[in-house]
């Protein structure tokens, strides 16, 4: 969708750590934001999801090392109150929006029901038509 609508669509990613299901979810969210400080958010995010069933502080550090992050900076950023606050704010936003699980996708505040390319396209086209 970003390629089809380069001037009309932007992607906004929000964290919604499901700690009841994944005890390391919040730590993983903060770690991904710490990786973002070094330009490696999406790579880190992908590795987290590949390893969702074995996440721990050790696994998170292993992923960071594999991605060749500056480990001292990564550790410092993981302890950043600003990143912790960002995850907390994202979580609150999700709760306020009625998010119950992940992934949940919204287009201009509308919950996307059909998570397929045609489903995305339909809702985006409807939202763009409202602007005209």
Image (tube, rainbow, N blue to C red):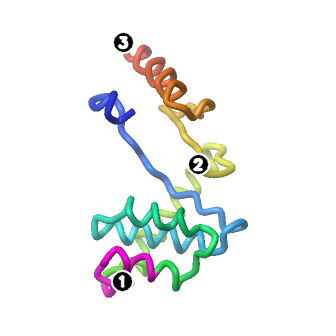
Q: What is the distance, in whole Å, between disc 2 and disc 3 at their CAs?
A: 30 Å
The answer to whether residue 124 is left or right of residue 16 is: left
Query: Which of the two discs, 1 and 3, labels the residue nearer the N terminus?
Result: 1
Q: Distance between the residues labelled 1 and 3?
A: 47 Å
Quadrant assignment for the N terminus: top left
Residue for badge 2: 103
Query: Residue at left 36%, top 33%?
Result: 9
Q: Name the residue under label 3.
A: 132
On the image, which quarter does residue 3 sit in? top left
The residue where tag 1 is placed is 76
**Residue 53: percent from left, percent from top:** 64, 70
Q: Nearer the viewer, residue 82 or 27?
A: 27
User: What residue is at 38 percent from the left and 59 percent from the top?
Assistant: 42
Element type at mark 3:
loop
In the rendered structure, which segment of residues is drawn in magenta?
61-72
Q: Do the residues labelled 2 and 1 touch (CB within 8 Å)?
A: no
Q: From the image, state whether disc 2 or disc 1 is nearer to you.
A: 2
Q: Is mark 2 on a helix, strand or loop?
A: loop
Is 121 located above or below residue 33 in the figure? above
């Amino acid at each position: 969708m970003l390629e089809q609508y380069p001037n009309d669509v932007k992607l906004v990613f929000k964290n919604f750590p499901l700690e009841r299901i994944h005890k390391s979810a919040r730590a993983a969210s903060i770690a991904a934001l710490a990786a973002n400080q070094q330009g490696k958010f999406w790579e880190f995010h992908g590795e987290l999801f590949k390893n969702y069933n074995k996440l721990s502080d050790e696994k998170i550090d292993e992923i960071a090392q594999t991605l060749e992050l500056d480990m001292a900076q990564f550790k410092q950023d993981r302890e950043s109150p600003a990143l912790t606050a960002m995850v907390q704010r994202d979580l609150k936003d999700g709760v306020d929006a009625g998010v119950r699980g992940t992934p949940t996708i919204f287009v201009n505040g509308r919950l996307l029901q059909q998570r397929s390319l045609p489903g995305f396209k339909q809702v985006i086209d409807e939202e763009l038509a409202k602007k005209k």
